[in-house]
Image (cartoon, helix red, strand yellow):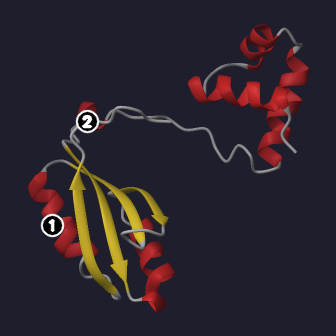
């Protein structure tokens, strides 16, 4: 489904999601219409899910970022994950194997607000058995 040219296009877009079709075409020595068709094809096949922005949390008043492991009753796993996904403070939610059943990235203004979110919002979701936060000190790599 994805060939070598598609992978080169994806590499460019991963580095700069705002790269224009003409910029990509120039970099790959192809014409713009070829790139446009390829990108649309990647979108239509679900390879490219969306274009987004990577934000530096501290620049917008977010001074507490945590990766939170959540354990649930097995029967409540998907329901709890969905409720976590609906929290505006949750920037990333995934079900997982390993130490915790659900992993979430939570952004908030400070530690006090984080405590309220952990105990007052996440901890009160029906089916949640355990909440295990880990404060992020510094992100060394993002997408």
- Say if 42 sits above or below 77 in the image: above
Category of crowding for the residue at label 2, using alpha-carbon neighbours closer than 10 angstroms: few (below 14), some (14–19), many (at least 20): few
Q: What label sits on residue 116 in the rendered view?
A: 1
Q: Is residue 86 visible?
A: no
Q: Nearer the viewer, residue 76 or 20?
A: 76
Splitting the image into 4 quarters, where does residue 89 fall?
A: bottom left
Q: Is residue 68 visible?
A: yes
Q: What label sits on residue 21 in the rendered view?
A: none
- Say if 26 sits above or below 99 in the image: above
Quadrant in which the N terminus is drawn: top right
Q: Give the mark toward the camera: 2 or 1.
A: 2
Residue at x 70% of width, y 43% of height: 48
Residue at x 21% of width, y 38% of height: 61
Q: What label sits on residue 138 in the rendered view?
A: 2
Please give left or right for residue 77 compared with residue 66 in the image. Answer: right
Please give left or right for residue 76 compared with residue 137 in the image. Answer: right
Q: Position of residue 130 (x, y in %)?
A: 26, 78
Q: Nearer the viewer, residue 74 or 59?
A: 74
Q: Position of residue 66 (x, y in %)?
A: 26, 53
Residue at the far front in the pictured view: 98
Residue at x 80% of width, y 13% of height: 28
Splitting the image into 4 quarters, where does residue 38 fall?
A: top right
- Say if 63 sits above or below 75 in the image: above
C-alpha distance separating marks 2 and 1: 22 Å
Label 2: state its secondary structure.
loop
Residue at the far left in the pictured view: 112
- Say if 45 sits above or below 115 in the image: above
Splitting the image into 4 quarters, where does residue 118 fall?
A: bottom left
Residue at x 75% of width, y 10% of height: 27
- Choose the circle earlier in sequence order: 2 or 1: 1
Q: Nearer the viewer, residue 1 or 59?
A: 1
């Amino acid at each position: 489904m994805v060939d070598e040219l598609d992978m080169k296009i994806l590499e460019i877009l991963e580095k700069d999601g705002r790269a224009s079709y003409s910029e990509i075409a120039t970099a790959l020595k192809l014409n713009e219409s070829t790139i446009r068709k390829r990108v649309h094809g990647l979108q239509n096949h679900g390879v490219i899910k969306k274009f987004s922005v990577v934000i530096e949390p501290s620049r917008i008043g977010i001074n507490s970022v945590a990766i939170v492991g959540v354990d649930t009753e097995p029967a409540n796993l998907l329901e709890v994950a969905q409720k976590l996904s609906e929290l505006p403070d949750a920037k990333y939610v995934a079900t997982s194997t390993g130490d915790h059943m659900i992993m979430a990235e939570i952004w908030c203004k400070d530690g006090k607000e984080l405590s309220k979110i952990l105990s007052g919002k996440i901890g009160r979701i029906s089916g949640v058995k355990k909440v295990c936060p880990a404060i992020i000190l510094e992100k060394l790599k993002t997408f």
